[in-house]
Image (cartoon, grey):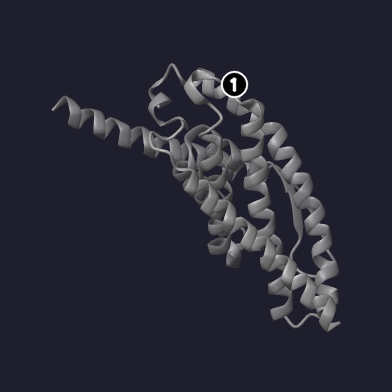
Amino acid sequence: MEQQVTVQRRKLILMVSVGLMAALVFVGNYMQISIPVAIGSATRIHLGNSMCLLAGMLFGPMTGGLASGIGAGLFDLLNPLYITSAPYTFLSKFAMGFLAGVIARYAFPEGKRRISVLIASGVAGQLAYIALYLLKSYVELLFLGNDPRAALVAILPKAATSSLNAAAAIVISVPLALALRTALLHTGFSALLAAPPRKKAAWTAAAVLLAVLICAAALALCLYLSIAIS
């Protein structure tokens, strides 16, 4: 009976964690500066990505991925400018939170803190998202009938703002993760905090990193083809 209660309590805390972090991601997206571009949808500088990284750094891959995808996807669904992008946003933001969570599990071995690993988790998560976001923006412009060179020029402002978002997200999320983890260790959330897996799962990180490299290669190929065609 006690074990059943413990399992039910863990599930409840898991749902609360996902919901809480998704809410932070959602609100973070409203803290924004919109930047118009010549072609395609506007781009933004916002705090949503920092909350996506924070979710992965604190609670690991699945909670981080789900909270990131749900929070960002809900923001798109409620915004007429981005409503059609909601499914892709869910997937790309999930990838960011998931990858950050996979690597962040190795940042706290046996009570120690490896800040460099935590920073690496943020960089990896952001690179994954930027690759997927720019690829989607470029392909979308091509489908709308834009010239490949014009589409390439159009995504350059998005690449710049995405880089600013990435830098800000890492600077914000890393110290927050360190501070909040210390506080959450003494609460009911401690059982869900990101920790090294009991079994070696280096292949998991390798598989996710490989997926990111494939996305980056696909983006590079699209850019190369656009230049070659034009």
Q: Furthest residue to the left?
A: 1
Q: Left or right of 152: which side holds 174?
A: left
Residue drawn 72% across and 33% down?
A: 171
Q: Is residue 69 above or below residue 104?
A: below
Quadrant including the C terminus:
bottom right
On the image, the x and y values in percent for residue 155 come to: 79, 64
Left or right of 187 on screen, residue 152:
right
| Residue bearing mark 1 | 179
Seen in the picture, residue 62 relative to 38 is either above or below; the reply is above
- Is residue 97 shown to the viewer in this render? yes
* Observer able to see residue 23: no
Comparing 202 with 147, the one in front is 202
Q: Which of 92 and 79 is in front in this view?
A: 92
Q: In which quarter of the image is residue 197?
A: top left
The residue positioned 45% from the left and 30% from the top of the image is 193
Instruction: Report the amino acid beneath label 1.
Output: Ala
Q: Is residue 186 rendered to the left or right of residue 161?
A: left
Residue in the image at 61% along x and 56% along y: 212
Q: In this view, does 88 lie above or below 128?
A: below
